[in-house]
Amino acid sequence: MIIVLMGAPGAGKGTQADLLSERAGYRKISTGDALRKHVKLGTQVGKQAGEIMARGELVPDNVLLQVLKEELGSNPKEIVILDGYPRNLAQAETLKEVVEGVHPVVCCAHLDVRRDDIIARLSGRRTCSGCGASFHVSANPPKKQGVCDKCGSNLIQRPDDDAKSIAVRLDVYDKATEPVLDYYRKRNLYNRVNGGGQTDQIFGDLKGVINSCLK
Ligand SMILES: [Zn+2]
């Protein structure tokens, strides 16, 4: 059974997917991670994807879906949290066709966070230029401003983490995923989860939604 976890960049989807895996024992599949793994292992589909990525092109849907199929395997009892897929309507439709028999989608949980909050979260991110550790100017500030707690290197803001670039990223995401949310609404699988507030509170709400889907 597949739980599709939706949420804009910065909505905290990765964090919640990790918690669901740690605390509830669900298997988390992130298409990004799965893709990197297959490229690294040099599987047939991984080689194909690697060549496309090396050319700087986007991996097409059919290759992504192949990676996903291999990751999903054939255990119909397993509860899978799908993170990062589907990202557009075409992917939602092919996902149904390809995996429905073994892994039906039983829930679409949408972590909904106000746009202003997302922009505040993402634009406050600071990354260490030395060790890559990440901080946040208000939520997780370093002891000394602009300096990494771990290694003492300078903290930098990634060039695409300014408010303007974030807004563009969110627009692109919304435009592609609105039809996906509608798709699941029409099938009575859509559930909104308030993604604002504390991590544990959000986790509780999310788990409640998933429990009711699994009944
Ligand atoms: Zn550092």
Image (spheres, grey):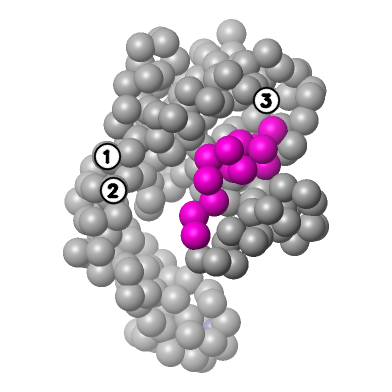
Q: Quadrant of residue 50?
A: bottom right
Secondary structure, magenta segment, majority class: helix
Mark 1, residues whose alpha carbon is within 10 Å: few (<14), some, or many (≥20)?
few
Q: Position of residue 148 (x, y in %)?
A: 48, 84
Q: Is residue 201 visible?
A: no
The response on whether ligand 1 sits within 8 Å of label 3 is no
Identified at 32% across, 68% down, the residue is 161
Q: Position of residue 22 (x, y in %)?
A: 67, 41
Real-space Cα distance between discs 3 and 1? 29 Å
Instruction: Check if residue 132 falls in the magenta segment.
Output: no
**Disc marking residue 204:** none
Identified at 48% across, 81% down, the residue is 128
Which label lies toward us, 2 or 3?
Answer: 2
- Amino acid type at image mark 1: Lys
**Residue 142 placement, left or right of 59:** left
**Disc marking residue 175:** 1
Q: Quadrant of residue 182?
A: top left
Instruction: Check if residue 67 falls in the magenta segment.
Output: yes
Task: Give the quadrant of ligand 1.
Answer: bottom right
Q: Is residue 108 visible?
A: yes
- Amino acid type at image mark 2: Val
Real-space Cα distance between discs 2 and 1? 5 Å
Q: Secondary structure at mark 1?
A: helix
What residue does disc 3 label?
79
The response on whether ligand 1 sits within 8 Å of label 2 is no
What residue does disc 2 label?
172
Looking at this view, is 30 or 48 the one in front? 48
Instruction: Tell me the magenta residue range.
Output: 57-69
Residues at discs 2 and 1 in contact (Cβ within 8 Å): yes
